Amino acid sequence: MKKLPKKRQQQRMHRAWPVPMEVKPSAIEGRGLFTKVPLRARQKIGEFAGERITQDEGRKRAKTRKQIAIVEIHNGQAIDAGNETTGFRFINHSCSPNTFLRIIRERAEFYTLHPINAGTELTVNCHPSHHQGTLSCKCGTATCRQFL
């Protein structure tokens, strides 16, 4: 596996979530990430955490996985949350999401698109994705594109 040089590599980023959230069963797919409190529009809700790898390595790994938890960031780098047990690794795709992902150099941050009620599953639009239109979408929204 091709990894970044040791001094640039972060195996895990353990940052406290800015808002209380929990991972639990999802109606969309497997487990999902849910907010425990109401959220404001455009509120930062957290950061994607995981192993720092090159984008090339991320694309190789993505080819072997059904569920991909890899975000490509700045300067040929990616974050692989495949081994994480909590956090944004569990945010599910929706064609009508309630959050968005913002890449800021070496970070991937999540923000709300609009106010969100407590207990709501957090979703993000993963399009385009590493699946390249080959995986069926399960979001069930009126605007669903059917594939990721």
Image: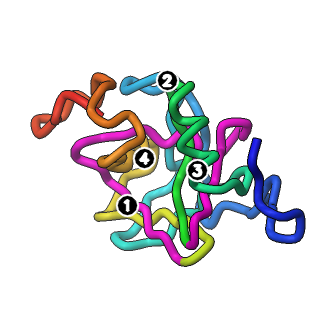
Assess disc 1: are there few (<14), some (14-19) or many (≥20) residues with their C-alpha within 10 Å of its C-alpha: some
CA gap between label 4 and label 1 equals 10 Å
Q: Position of residue 55 (x, y in %)?
A: 57, 54
105 relative to 99, above or below:
below
Rendered image quadrant of residue 15: bottom right
Residue 103 among those drawn in magenta? yes
Question: In the displayed image of the protein, which residue is found farthest to the bottom?
Answer: 105
Residue depicted at x 61% and y 62%: 77
Amino acid carrying mark 4 in the image: Leu
Q: Give the labeled residue for mark 4.
A: 122
Q: Give the labeled residue for mark 2.
A: 66
| Count of number-bearing discs | 4
Q: Give the labeled residue for mark 3.
A: 56
Assess disc 3: are there few (<14), some (14-19) or many (≥20) residues with their C-alpha within 10 Å of its C-alpha: some
Amino acid carrying mark 1 in the image: Phe
Rendered image quadrant of residue 146: top left
Mark 4 and mark 2 in contact? Answer it, CB < 8 Å.
no
Earlier sequence position, callout 4 versus callout 2 = 2
Amino acid carrying mark 2 in the image: Lys
CA gap between label 1 and label 2 equals 22 Å
Q: Position of residue 104 (x, y in %)?
A: 52, 76
Quarter containing the C terminus: top left
Q: Nearer the viewer, residue 100 or 43?
A: 100
Q: Nearer the viewer, mark 3 or mark 4?
A: 3
Earlier sequence position, callout 4 versus callout 1 = 1
Query: The residue tagged with tag 4: helix, strand or loop?
Result: strand
Earlier sequence position, callout 3 versus callout 1 = 3
